[in-house]
Amino acid sequence: MPTHYDTLGVSKSASTDEIKKAYRKLCMQYHPDVASSSSSKSTAQSKNADKFKRISEAYSILGNENKRRRYNFDISESGIQELRKKAAKARGTAGGGGNSFAATLPRNVLIGGILGIAGVTIIRSIMPEKENDDTHHEHTGKKRLVEAWLNPKTKRWEKPRPWDQEYQRLQPVLQFVPRDQVDDGGKR
């Protein structure tokens, strides 16, 4: 299939001015109004009209820098895709089908999964696990402290509960107390 560059008869490295000159020259040659006066046959007119449409489409893309950049990328991608298809056909005939799961699994998913698992493993090995109160006390010689208030009814230290009516009524002063002395309602 001819590219827009082939349609206008210019190279891929042609400047905008060269593309414009080639377009104007081809318009004068294939424009339906101009070409119809020189040739009287209807088949020639329809061929000229089709050729003129292709020329106009090619110029609308190649004459605009943004569209031209995108078109260049698209045609380069299609060339790569064609090469990949040919290589896959060659592998399929030489390799005996190649219908294994690993062959059909996209490479980026496979590589991403491997890298993800490796990353998690590395992070887990670098970061220490969460210590409980006993191991913290063994390492530092100090107990972990938390903010708590002394409930006058139960005579126990409790975690602050601002939504509790008793806590709101008393408005107790919070103090730092070792975590093992605080009653957290059986939730630890």
Image: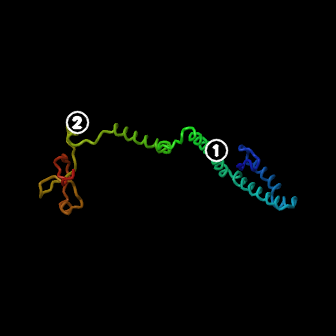
Answer with the quarter of the image where residue 122 lies.
top left
How far apart marks 1 and 2 lie (CA) works out to 64 Å
Looking at the rendered structure, the secondary structure element under dot 2 is: helix
Residue for point 50% across, 42% down:
103
Closer-to-camera residue (104/94): 94
Q: Which residue lies furthest to the front in this view?
A: 96
Q: Earlier in the sequence, mark 1 or mark 2?
A: 1
Q: Position of residue 84 (x, y in %)?
A: 59, 42
Q: Name the residue under label 2.
A: 139
Residue 31 image label: none
Residue 98 left/right relative to 139: right
Amino acid type indicated by mark 1: Gly
Q: In which quarter of the image is residue 96?
A: top right
Badge 1 local density, few (<14 within 10 Å), some, or many (20+)?
few
Query: Which x, y percent locates residue 151?
Result: 15, 56
Which x, y percent locates residue 4?
71, 50
Q: Which amino acid does label 2 sit on?
A: His
- Residue 121, image x, y percentages: 36, 39
Position of residue 127 relative to residue 34, above or below, is above
Task: Tell me the residue at 70%/49% (across/down).
Answer: 1
Please state which of the two labelled residues, at mark 1 or mark 2, is closer to the viewer: 1
Q: Residue at x 74, y 57 (%)?
A: 53
Q: Which mark is residue 79?
A: 1
Q: Is mark 1 on a helix, strand or loop?
A: helix
Identify the residue at image location x=22%, y=48%. 146
